Image: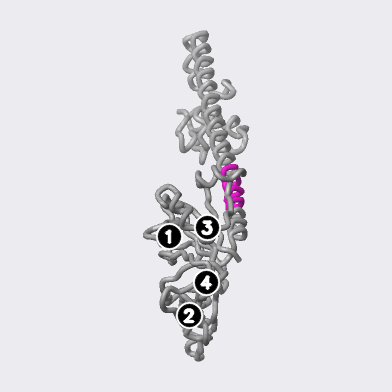
Amino acid sequence: MNFDFITLLEKYLLNTCDAPGTKKVHLGEDLKSILSEAPGKCVPYAVIEGAVRSVKETLNSQFVENCKGVIQRLTLQEHKMVWNRTTHLWNDCSKIIHQRTNTVPFDLVPHEDGVDVAVRVLKPLDSVDLGLETVYEKFHPSIQSFTDVIGHYISGERPKGIQETEEMLKVGATLTGVGELVLDNNSVRLQPPKQGMQYYLSSQDFDSLLQRQESSVRLWKVLALVFGFATCATLFFILRKQYLQRQERLRLKQMQEEFQEHEAQLLSRAKPEDRESLKSACVVCLSSFKSCVFLECGHVCSCTECYRALPEPKKCPICRQAITRVIPLYNS
């Protein structure tokens, strides 16, 4: 495999290539010369593919013989069952109780011999996708006595055991690095990019890494559309409810004004001896006397027959508040 270099969104590369977008350029000995011609001797976002080579010393696996690498991660993870008081079920739960990562300086070099070019990888632990390979994994089940089992059922936690894992970035493994490529004092460095862009060190090739990112972007687009539609639908229902409530308040206000106007007209047309009886008349039928007190609003506006004829749920004809109970009114 050749030593490959891909510039992403670089103006100088787009000017030298016919097709827009990401371009893959085969490089070897020309890497330093191309970087020296770039603005600031730097490519802000680039992809490098090569083999891992240690600079000085290497890390030896604690469990596998003749396994050497440049990054070693040892993890102890606790597995247990936790009682869910809501669903009344035992759920699997895991927690990392110890993790240690060891690193040594390393370069990315071509797979072919005779090409004197290397890229020093800086801050590998800052990468989003660190391409480590699991070289050892063992599960140590917990040994429990009868008393421990009873105590675990009472406490709601049942330990299952400890999983021991060793991951390594082996010497000679193929690694794809995505970050800022810089030429400094005749040495090439790959380091975390600026301006909030992500830093990758992946065991996948560039095409696989790109497909995975595109799948993630499509998923986020679908989720954005779904949540956007849900937000619009919720906002529509809230606004519709507010509109209907406002229309209902306007209708009730208009009915109340019409009733007051109609009552005033009746009082103005009635004889002086009939005005007192009209004031005490039921607002619904205007023939019987008011004989009910509606609670909780306290309005006295209806006779017993008209109250019984009100539709369910019964509401006050004046304020449209729900009627919780009725108290008979007796005129002396």
Q: CA distance from mark 1 to mark 4?
A: 18 Å
Q: Amino acid at mark 2?
A: Ile
- Is the residue 297 above or below the residue 49 in the image? above
- Magenta stretch bounds: 217-229
Question: Which quadrant of the view contains residue 123?
Answer: bottom left
Helix, strand or loop for disc 4: loop
Q: CA distance from mark 3 to mark 4?
A: 18 Å
Q: Which mark is residue 154?
A: 2
Residue appearing at x 48%, y 12% in the figure: 273
Q: Which residue has dot 3 on it?
A: 47
Identify the main secondary structure in magenta.
Answer: helix
Q: Amino acid at mark 3?
A: Val
Q: Which badge, 2 or 1, comes first in the chain's sequence?
A: 2
Q: Amino acid at mark 4?
A: Leu
Q: Which residue has dot 4 on it?
A: 132
Q: Which badge, 3 or 1, comes first in the chain's sequence?
A: 3
Residue 221 in the magenta stretch? The answer is yes
Front in this rendered view, residue 152 or 119 = 119
Residue appearing at x 54%, y 34% in the figure: 239
Residue 267 lies left or right of residue 1; in this view the side is: left
